Structure formats: structure tokens, C-alpha cells
């Protein structure tokens, strides 16, 4: 058991969100959302398109105006600038990959570590990313725009890991990818949780896939949390699957 998972077993929360409201201009998109993320665990946000899942990730990253309490490891990050939240250990992998397409694979990885100063360890972590995703090692000198969709997603995840984050936010990691690539990505995410105790919050339209890797799940509907519980229990509940998850 990793140190993070030991903390989780003791009931500590890595991320604590209370009364979160979020806005796009005058339009309110989230309404008094409460949730916790335990250290070393994977949490998933489920719901239909437009329910508020991506908005929740943006709110946690300081990308849109919010009200409410957001605490990361006991530090209030609500209302802080996005770059400050990143420096505190929150890495965001947005929908659509979010790679810097005009630079190489290796340059993307170094950009992921731009808040760090430990150059020797940065180089070691780059090699670790190549071990995690061997295809990236083969393409280290290629521009990101020449990669396939699956390779770009591998690069986006690797770049986020270069931060050595306390918390990774992943928005639709399977979107637009072939089934074999999706299987490979989620196996890697599962290993990162098990072997390294990395905490993750995953937004994923494929509910069955998300529930397979997650420890806990929250269901969002029209900007409100309508249900939560252990992922395996929610996945087994046929009425919940039919009403909210579409399978």
C-alpha cells in the first residue's frame, strides 16, 4: 500500500469541495456541489452531456469564476489563478488532448515540468514516461501534431505526470480513440493508481469503463450532484445504470 493509499484508509481527503458554484458570465452552471477525493484513489464524475462534468474540472483549475470552498491537501485553492493551482500540484488533461502541437514530444514533456527545478530528476522522469508509453520514446523528436490521436493522448497524460501531481484531472480520456488504445490507456491509469498512488478525477462518457477503474463515483445532473457512492455499487445497480448511465 502506498503512502497516499494509507492516508485514504485513514479517511483523509486530498481534495475537499463544499458548496461549489460555477458561472459562465451570468449563467450559473454548478449548484452547491459537494465531493471529496481520497488520496491514492480514482474518483469519477458521471452524467449526460451538458450535466456539468467538464465545468467541474474547469472550476477546480480556476478557469471559470466560482464560489464555495475548494481545499487541496488542506490549502484553499478556490479563487486562485490557474498557474498557482498547477504549482500546488493539480494537473489537467483536457478533452481534445491539449498538447502543444508545434513542438516535439520531448519538448512537451519538459513543458509539463516547467514549475520544477530538479533538472536531473526531470530527465529521469522523461525516461520513465518513455517506459510507461514506449511509443512516445520512438517519436521523441517528432512534432506532436504528427502523432496519432492515441499517441497525443499518451503524451497529454505523460506531460501531466511530469508535474508530479498530487491530483490529475482527466476529461474524456477515451474520446475518439480506438478500443485497443483505450484499453491500453486505462490499464496504464490503473497501474499509476495501484503502483504510485496517484489520485485522479476522471470525467468519462463511457460510464462502464470509468466505473471499472474508479473507487468512488458521483453522478451529476444539470449542475447538481444527485447521487454518489462506491463505484462498484453504482455499477451493479441496474436502476442507476438505466436512469443515468445509459447501459
Image (cartoon, rainbow, N blue to C red):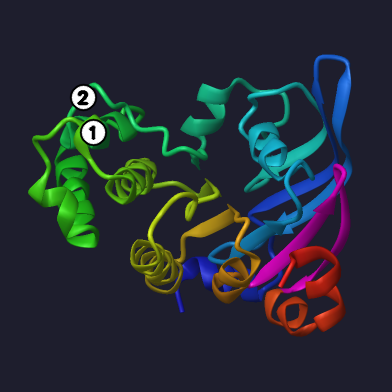
Q: Which residue is mark 1?
A: 144
Inspect the magenta stretch and tell me whether residue 218 lies in it: yes
Q: Name the side, left or right, on which 7 lies relative to 18.
A: left
Crowd band around label 1 with a 10 angstrom C-alpha radius: few (<14), some (14–19), many (20+):
many
Q: Earlier in the sequence, mark 1 or mark 2?
A: 2
Q: Position of residue 199 (x, y in %)?
A: 53, 58
Image location (x, y in percent) of residue 216: 69, 69
Left or right, 56 with respect to 196, comes to right
- Rate crowding at label 2 as few (under 14), some (14 to 19) or many (20 or more) other CA atoms within 10 Å: some
Q: Which residue is mark 2?
A: 103
Residue 53 in the image, given as x and y percentages of width and height: 71, 45
- The image shows residue 5, relative to residue 155, as above or below, that is below
Considering depth in this image, is 207 or 23 the residue closer to the camera?
207
Do the CB atoms of the residues marked 1 and 2 lie less than 8 Å apart? yes
Which residues are drawn in magenta?
215-230
Residue positioned 35% across, 32% down in the render: 99
Question: Quadrant where the C terminus lies?
Answer: bottom right
Q: Is residue 233 above or below residue 101?
A: below
Q: Is residue 134 shown left or right of residue 10? A: left
- At mark 1, the secondary structure is helix
Q: Is 167 part of what is drawn in magenta?
A: no
Front one among 185 and 31: 185
245 shown above or below 232: above
Q: How many marks?
A: 2
Amino acid at each position: 500500500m502506498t503512502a497516499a493509499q494509507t492516508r485514504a484508509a485513514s479517511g483523509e481527503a486530498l481534495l475537499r469541495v463544499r458548496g461549489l458554484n460555477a458561472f459562465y458570465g451570468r449563467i450559473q452552471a454548478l449548484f452547491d456541489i459537494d465531493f471529496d477525493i481520497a488520496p491514492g484513489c480514482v474518483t469519477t464524475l458521471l452524467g449526460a452531456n451538458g450535466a456539468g462534468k467538464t465545468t467541474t474540472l474547469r472550476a477546480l483549475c480556476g478557469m471559470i469564476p466560482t464560489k464555495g470552498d475548494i481545499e487541496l491537501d488542506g490549502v484553499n485553492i478556490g479563487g486562485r489563478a490557474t498557474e498557482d493551482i498547477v504549482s500546488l500540484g493539480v494537473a489537467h488533461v483536457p478533452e481534445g488532448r491539449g498538447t502543444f502541437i508545434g513542438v516535439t514530444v520531448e519538448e512537451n514533456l519538459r513543458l509539463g515540468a516547467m514549475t520544477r527545478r530538479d533538472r536531473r530528476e526531470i530527465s529521469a522522469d522523461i525516461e520513465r514516461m518513455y517506459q510507461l508509453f514506449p511509443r512516445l520514446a520512438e517519436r521523441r523528436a517528432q512534432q506532436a501534431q504528427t502523432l496519432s490521436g492515441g499517441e497525443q493522448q499518451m503524451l497529454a497524460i505523460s506531460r501531466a505526470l511530469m508535474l508530479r501531481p498530487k491530483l490529475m484531472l482527466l476529461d474524456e480520456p477515451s474520446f475518439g480513440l480506438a478500443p485497443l488504445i483505450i484499453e491500453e490507456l486505462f490499464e496504464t491509469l490503473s497501474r499509476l493508481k495501484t503502483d504510485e498512488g496517484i489520485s485522479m478525477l476522471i470525467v468519462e462518457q463511457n460510464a462502464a469503463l470509468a466505473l471499472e477503474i474508479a473507487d468512488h463515483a458521483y453522478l451529476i445532473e444539470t449542475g447538481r450532484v444527485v447521487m454518489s457512492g462506491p463505484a462498484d455499487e453504482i455499477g451493479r445497480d441496474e436502476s442507476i445504470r438505466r436512469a443515468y448511465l445509459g447501459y
